Image (tube, grey):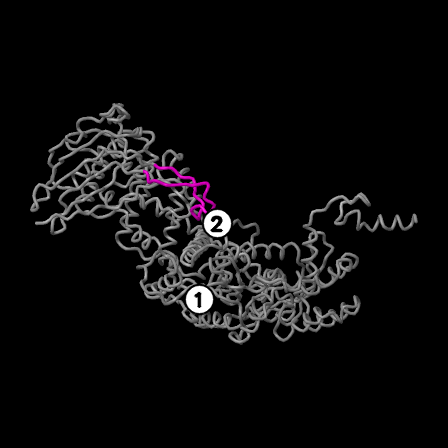
Amino acid sequence: MSDCFDYSSDDTEDDDQYDEEDVNCNEYDDDDFYKSDDQFDGRNQISDYAGEGTNRTDSEEESFNSNVVDSPGGKTKLWKPIVPKDFMPDVDAIYQSLEEAVEMYKLYADKAGFGVRLNTVTRFGDKTIKKRYVVCNKMGKIPNRSTDTLDPEGSGRNKRNSNFKITDCKALIKFERLHMQTNACKIYEFEENHNHPLETKEERRYSKRARRLSYKDKEFIVRSSTSNIGATKAHKLQASLQGGYENIGPESIDYKNFRRKVGNIIGDKDAQLVVDKMNMRKDEFHNYTFEYKCVDSVLNAMFWADETDKLYYKEFGDVISFDATFRTNKYGMIFVPFTAIDNHKRSINIGAGLLSNESIESYRWLLEAFLKAHVKHPQLVLTDQDPAILQAVEAIFPNSNHRLCMWHIMKKLQAKVSADFLKNTDFRKRFTKLVWNVYIEPEVFESRWKLLMRKFKLQDKRWFKDMYRDRKLWIPAYFKDMPLHGLMKTTSRSESVNSFFNKYSNCGNLLIYFMMNYDTTIGKQRNAQQKLEHDTKNAKHEMTLPSGLLEHAAAVYTKKIFYEVKKEIFKAAWYCSIDSVEKIDGWQVVMITQTDKSKQLKIKCKVELKLPEKEVKCSCNHFIRTGILCRHIFAVLKNNHIEEIPEQYILRRWSRDAISSHLFAMKHVAMEIEDDTFKLLTEAYNNIEYCLDHFKRSKEKLLEFVEKTRTLKRAAIEFASSNQTSSDNDEEEIIRMLGIRSIPDEINIHPPASIRTKGSGTKKRMVSAIEKAVAAAKKKTRMCTGCNQYVNRNWRTCKVRLARESKAA
C-alpha cells in the first residue's frame, strides 16, 4: 500500500475581490466542500443545523463571541471562539464517515463565525481518501508583489487597487480514516485559535456562504429575464419581496455574475440552441411549424407558428398585416410578427419570423414559410411601402389584395410640398378628405384627384404622380367590393404589436433569451384574449331599447362587437328616418335620411330588402367594410318588424363561438414540457407558500409547521451527505431553466456576425425636408446681439444688423 498525496490548489490570493466584469462569486468556494450543505438563502442567513445530543433551535441561539488571547510568543493576538461544548470538536473523536466529520466542523465553524474550505488530501493506493485537512478560509500567505516607480517601463500594465482577505490563519482540523476497509475516521489534530476577528451573527450575511445563490434565486433571475427584467432590477425586486436587503443573502453582483454565467454557458452555441429548441417543440407539440434557413452554416432566417396561431389564422386570417421591427436581439436580426384581428377586435399574433436582411429573397422565403404553415392565402395583406415587401407579396400571394399603409403615405405629404404651401392653402384639408373617403367610386376619385392637382399646380410633382400610379394599392375607393377591407387601413396594429414585443426584449438579447421573451409576450397576449372570452360569456347587457334585434345581438356577438351593433341600432332609432318605400322586381327599395345630433348634416342612403330571403344591402357599404350591419339597414329591419339579425349577416369571426373552447384547455406552447422533477419542485414551492399564507395568523400552527420543516431540513442534510452529490450543478439547472435538452458539443449553425439594416451605417442617404426641419428645431438657440432675438445665427451673420448698417451707410 502506498500513500498518494493530492494537494488542492485553492486560489487564496485576493479571493474576495468581486469584479462584475470577469468574476463569478460561486467560483471562490470549493463546490465539493459545500456539496452536503443546505441551500443557504437570504431568508435564513444563519444555518440551524442540529447536532446529535442537542435540541437547540434558531430562536434559542445566542450570538457567540470570542476570547482574545496572546500567541505563544506574545507578539500577536489570537481569537479563540466561544462555542458550546455540544459543537466543539474533540481530538480522537470517531465519526462514521468523513462526510459526517466534515459536516461537524462546518457546523462548528458556522457557530464560531468563520468560513472554511477543503485543503490537503492524502489518498490510499486505490484513490480512496486517507487524510483530509479542513482549514479556515483565511488561510494562505499574501503574495509578494514588487513595484518600482523609477522603472520607466514598469510592469507593462496598470495595477488595480486590491486588498486581501487572507491572513495566513493557522486554524484547521485534520481527519484520518481508521482503516482502509472502513469509512470511519477520527480527529487527530485540531487548532482552534485564529489570527483574525471572527464574524458576529449580524455579519454572517455578508459571508460568501450566505451569498450563495439558491435554486429559487437562480430561477428568479432567469424567469425575470423573460420579462426584460435585468439582474440588477431582479435583485431589487427580490429585496422588496423579502422585506429588505437584510433578508436576502446574495448581492446584486452575484445576480449579475449568474446572469453572465448563463450567457457564457450559451456562448457561441446560441443559434444552434435556438434551432434545437424549436425542433424539439416541432417534435413534441402537435401541429407546430418551424422553418429555418442557413447560408454557409450561418442562421439566415427563421419562421415559427404553433397550433394556436394556425387556429387563429383559420378564423381571423382574412385581413393580416406585418411590419419589421429592429433592436430585439444581440445580432440585429429583424423581427417580423404577423398580425390579425380577433373577434374582440384585438390584435393577435398568427406567426413570426427572424430575418438577417431585408432583401426580396428574405421576404419571399418568409412568406413561403408562412403559406406552408397556413396553406390558404389571406384576402388582404397590409404593409408599408418597402419595395422588397411589395415584390415578395406579389410573388407569393398572387391571389391576395395588397394594400399600402395610408398613414405612412400621408406622413410624407408635408415633406413633398413646402410648409408655406400647406399653411396658406386648404390643400391638406381637401387632399385628406379625398383620399380617406370610403363612399366615392373609383371614377369619382380619379376626376377629383385631377381637378385638385390642376388647381394647386401639382400635376408635375413626381411624388404625386407616383402615388396616383399606385392608387389601387392604397385608396379606399378601389377596395369597396372587398369584404372587411375597412378593418385595416394602416399598419398601426403591426406597429402597436411591435411596440408590445419590444417592451419584453432588448437589443442585447441572445436568441435563446429573445425566444423566451417572445413566449412571455405571447402568453400575456393570449391570456388577455382568454379574459375577454370569459367577460363575454359572463356579461349581462343592459337593453336600453325594447328591441328584439338588440337582444339577439347580445346573444350572438362578443362583448366588443355587441357595443358597436348596439350603437348602430340606437342611431337607427334616433337619427334615421324613412323617406320613401318602393317595390322594384321583388325588392323593397327604401330611401333613408340620416342626420347628426345638430340636425344639420344630412346623409341620403338607399337600402334594398328582399323579404322572403331576408337579403339586404345598403349603398353605404358598411357591412362590406366592417362585417356589421349599418344603422340604415337596422332602421329598415325594424320597420318590417324583423326581430332577429338575418343569419347570413352574422359573420362567424365576430361571434361568441368563433374560438373553440378546447383551445384554451390546451397546454400553452410557450411553456416548455416539464419533467416530473420540475413539476414536483414547483408544487413543493406552491405548497409552502400556501401553508404560510394560511398559518400566518395562528402562532400555534405556524410553530408546528416550522418544526416539521426543520425535521425535513435535517433529513435533506443527511441525504446530501450520504449521496455526495453537488447541489450547485449550475449547468444542469440552467439547461432546465432555458427549456433545452442539453448543451450541444458540435456547432453546425452559427449566429449572424453583423447585420446592416436599410438606412443604417451610412450618411449617403438623402435627407428629407421634414428630417431637416426636425433637426433644425432640436438645435439650441441663443440670442443674437445683432437683432436681440433667439435665433440660429450670431452677430457676424445677422441679416438684420447687416441690413441696418447698409441702410445707415
Q: Answer left or right for 3 relative to 658.
A: left
Q: Picture quarter containing residue 198? A: top left
Which tag, 1 or 2, sits closer to the chain's start? 1
> Residue 360, relative to residue 436: is it above or below?
below
As drawn, the label of residue 540 is 2
Front one among 255 and 695: 255
Front one among 458 and 225: 225
* Amino acid type, label 2: Lys
Which residue is rendered at x = 31% and y = 54% of the image?
736
* Amino acid type, label 1: Phe
In magenta, the rendered stretch is 142-164
> Residue 750, relative to residue 681: is it above or below?
below
Front one among 219 and 481: 219
Q: Picture quarter containing residue 563? A: bottom right
> Residue 154, relative to residue 584: is it above or below?
above
Packing grade of label 2 (10 A; few <14, some 14-19, many >=20) is few
Coordinates of residue 740 in the picture (x, y in percent): 33, 58
Q: How far apart are marks 1 and 2 (CA)?
A: 42 Å
Coordinates of residue 749 in the picture (x, y in percent): 39, 66
Coordinates of residue 729 in the picture (x, y in percent): 28, 50
Coordinates of residue 52 in the picture (x, y in percent): 15, 33
Magenta stretch secondary structure, dominant: loop
Reply yes or no: does residue 505 show up in magenta: no
As drawn, the label of residue 303 is 1
The secondary structure type at the circle numbered 1 is strand
